[in-house]
Image: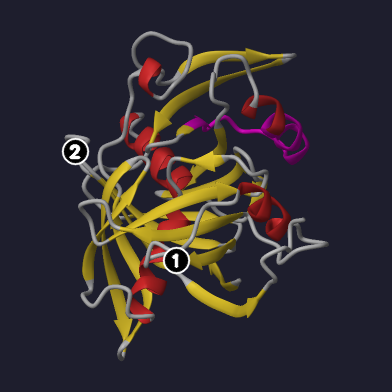
Amino acid sequence: MHFWKYQGIGNDFVVLDGSKGDLEIDTEWCRCACDRHFGIGADGVLYIMPGEGTDITMRVINADGSEAEMCGNGIRCVAVHAFNYGIVKKTTFTINTMAGIKEATVTLDGDKAVAATIDMGAPILDGRSIPIDWDGQYIDEDFAIVRYFFKANAVSMGNPHFITFQEMDDATIDRLGPMLECHRLFPKRTNVEFCKVIDGKIYIRVFERGAGWTLACGTGACASTVAAAINKLVPFDEPVDVHLPGGWLKITVNKDLAFVRMEGPADLVFEGDLPEEYSE
């Protein structure tokens, strides 16, 4: 099986081209391929599939074999790959995801796409729709786990995010990340973002559902910027610089919460082949 390895500010993926409809999703293959010792090594696998009323479809399989509704860094990698390999012929196109249809616009360096801007759609704030076990919005609410007490927020960008701006040391963050991912408040588990805002910029560490600690999370950057804007920590309708361990993104949150726009790079690292029976 031919594959491409991409990274979006350190969030890395195996990309498979099933745009001709000749590829089936194999979650066990994905789990083995993502293994960093015995496989290719990645945070997840991105399948490019035929469009469903769109130009293409993206499916996201996490490193543990579970499927994610959406992936912000992944969709930029898919957009850049789809343009550079002629799967789509235009610079603005639509991508179907399990979180709805997203519009992608690639940025060119010469005739090559090197980055993408994604209209991520409207954030979801209703607790039951995120989903969390909570009625109404969960914004700047008190939260307690073990001996830790802090304010937190819940936002979905098609996938659930639990966000705090509470000052914490690294040891506390290291402990809380995996505990919060599986907390009973989240019926489908959650991504967890530990944020601080300094001089109008957001700095994030993220524990991703199904992948663990990663260098970046695009939907997490979007959800965190939504929470920061609602809490009046950053402005609406202006690009906000968001730093993750792997690099920077620009996130713009519409004041009416009609859309969130994400801008960032995507890079091909290498390509290769694995035997079809690899996971057996």
Secondary element under disc 1, as helix, strand or loop, is helix
Q: Position of residue 254 (x, y in %)?
A: 21, 42
Q: Residue at x 48, y 11 (%)?
A: 133
Residue tagged 1? 77
- Depth check: give the residue in front, 150 or 82: 82
Question: Residue 198, relative to residue 187: is it above or below?
Answer: below
For the N terminus, the quadrant is bottom right
Q: Is residue 259 left or right of residue 204?
A: left
Confirm whether the magenta stretch covers residue 163: yes
The residues tagged by marks 1 and 2 sit, at their Cα atoms, a distance apart of: 24 Å
Secondary element under disc 2, as helix, strand or loop, is loop
Question: Residue 254, relative to residue 166: is it above or below?
Answer: below
Q: Residue at x 23, y 74 (%)?
A: 91
Residue 183 found in image quarter:
top right
Viewer can see residue 40: yes
Confirm whether the magenta stretch covers residue 152: no
Q: Is residue 75 left or right of residue 121?
A: right
Number of residues whose C-alpha sits closer than 10 Å to that of mark 2, classed few (under 14), some (14–19) or many (20 or more): few
- Depth check: give the residue in front, 54 or 172: 54
Q: Residue at x 35, y 37 (%)?
A: 226
Q: Residue at x 20, y 52 (%)?
A: 53
Q: Position of residue 161 (x, y in %)?
A: 48, 33
Question: Residue 121, relative to residue 148: is it above or below?
Answer: below
Q: Amino acid at mark 2?
A: Ala
Q: Which residues are magenta?
A: 161-177
In the displayed image of the protein, which residue is found farthest to the top? 135
The earlier-in-sequence mark between 1 and 2 is 1
Question: Given this view, does label 1 or label 2 mark the residue nearer the observer?
Answer: 1
Q: Is residue 102 left or right of residue 59?
A: left
Residue tagged 2? 258
